[in-house]
Amino acid sequence: MLASLGNYLAYFGTTLGLLILAVFVYVGILPYDEIALVRRGNVAAAVALAGTLIGYAVVVYSATIHGVSLLETAMWSAISLVVQIVAFEIVNFSVSDFKAGMEKGELSYGVVLGAFSIAVGIINAGCITP
């Protein structure tokens, strides 16, 4: 049991740290300040960020249960972050005036990005095989 607890703490601590790092990296590349928008009550930004976090976390979960080591989980976590950034760029390119819509709090923009991020994360997670 104690060995399992140590393994749990190692994986949980590492993956939680990777999640926090991923948030900083992800919001740092956006063309708008998503955290500031969320703090101002912008629901579109909150929905988009929530979807991105879920999409990222699904892959980290899949990497953790299918991987053979903590290093492999970290590698897939990094790949997941890149995939979430690509998902953002696809939506940003596909939806006209995306940045302006997010800054204005157009909920539909946040829902589209959030849903696409979750969908991409689920597909990405499914591609991780033992």
Image (cartoon, helix red, strand yellow):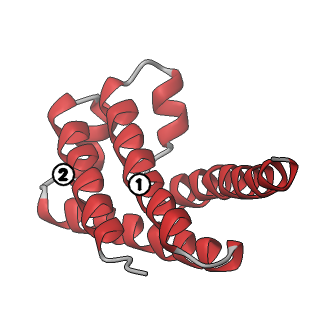
Q: Residue, x 84% and y 56% (percent of image)?
A: 3
82 sits left or right of 119 in the view: right
Place residue 100 in its image quadrant.
top left
Disc assigned to residue 97: 2
Q: Position of residue 96 (x, y in %)?
A: 12, 55
Q: Position of residue 13 (x, y in %)?
A: 76, 51
- Disc 1 element: helix
Q: Residue, x 22% and y 68% (percent of image)?
A: 90
Where is 64 relative to 42, above or below? below
37 sits left or right of 69 in the view: left
Location of the C terminus by quadrant is: bottom left
- Disc 2 element: loop
Q: Earlier in the sequence, mark 1 or mark 2?
A: 1
The reply to whether residue 30 is visible in this rendering is no
Residue type beneath disc 1: Val
Residue type beneath disc 2: Asp
Distance between the Cα atoms at labels 1 and 2?
A: 29 Å
The reply to whether residue 108 is visible in this rendering is yes
Q: Position of residue 18 (x, y in %)?
A: 66, 59
Q: Residue, x 41% and y 42% (percent of image)?
A: 49
Disc assigned to residue 58: 1
